[in-house]
Image (tube, rainbow, N blue to C red):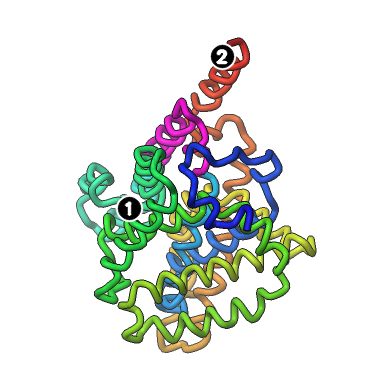
Amino acid sequence: MEGSPVDQCRHSPAELPALPRRHQRADWIDIAKGVSITLVVFWHVAGPLVPFNEALIFLRMPLFFFLAGLFLRGVFLQPSGDKFVFKFVNFVYLFVLWSALVFFSTTVPQALINGETVSLAPLLRIFIEPPQTLWFIYALLIAVTLLMVLRRVPLGVILAFSVVIYALLSADGNWRSLPFPERVMLLFPFIVMGVFSLEFIEGTLMRRVGLWPPMLAGFLLASWSVYDSPLAAVGPVTFLLSVWGITSVTMLAGWLAHRQRIGGRGWAFVGRHSLQVYVLHRIVQFYLLAVLARLGLQPSAEAGLWYTGFYLVSGGVVVALSVLVGWALARQPLFSPLFEVPWVKTLQSRRSASAVTR
């Protein structure tokens, strides 16, 4: 089938066609990003305190990386490598900047409250031990570099090799507290899938979005069944389970985009500000939970449903506040350097003007 993932894999990255402009801000992509960042924030806020949160590990970060792959496609399409340079510099800038901001706004105050000595060692070691809530940016930095180095290798070869590595690394069945390099290698195949899947999604999956309820329900049941079973150590099973989950959420996003209801528009708004939510949510979470604890509203584990409900509601509030704060900051030129290296757009404009005059 023309435009299928199989066809895309047969070509080297440099031969992939450029995307039409309309693909860059497709509604379903923004909705899927909104769902994805919400799952990530809920994990950081509630962790295993909320039932089923751990079993979503087969969806949460694979979906996050898959969607990132859609936006890394340009690394393959520009022979000059300009896209790579811009993304590389921006990722380094954002990772260092927000590691420092999160450290001084959460780690330092917590140490002072506890009467502990403040050590700068964690901040100086971010490229060795990245912060728990910011490691995705560092992983993207590594992924975009790998994509650039391998850009003349057919995507099918890259995907096959990365899936083999995935199968080897997942053979121990351990999905908790993985070392950073192992996490990156486990998630790299999903970025590769994102690079070549757009035409297949819009040409095939978007015609079948009505099937999302049984697809998503089946995935959730399968994920719950596999997570604590011996199948969690079988790489092909967990990989296909993640693909199933990504497909389900993609179809849900397409269905919401087609219906244009308030729910879909809300998810899309969150998705368009997913970067702001990602970098801000740790700070928002820290101060929100501190205030609630001071007010005596943070329940103990013995509170049962109220305990679970508290963290579910807190996760939703953290997402909402992060979106609103990020949206407000991004609208002010003074704060725009918080979300993009200041000179990137200037360099891009100069490159474009230079290309036109040649």
Q: Quadrant of the N terminus?
A: bottom right
Name the disc covering residue 131, or none. 1
For residue 270, which quarter of the picture? Answer: bottom right
> Majority secondary structure of the magenta segment?
helix
Q: Nearer the viewer, residue 249 or 324?
A: 249
> Residue drawn 64% across and 37% down?
331
**Residue range corresponding to the magenta coloring:** 72-96
Q: Nearer the viewer, residue 158 or 279?
A: 158
> How many C-alpha atoms fall within 10 Å of the one at disc 1: few (<14), some, or many (≥20)?
some
Secondary structure under the numbered disc 1 in the rendered image: loop
- From the top left corner, tell me how far across and down residue 105 is, in percent: 39, 48
Q: Which residue is mark 2?
A: 354
- From the top left corner, tell me how far across and down residue 308 is, in percent: 49, 81
Side of 328 relative to 298 (left or right): right
In the picture as drawn, the residue positioned furthest to the top comes out as 357
> Residue drawn 60% across and 52% down?
198
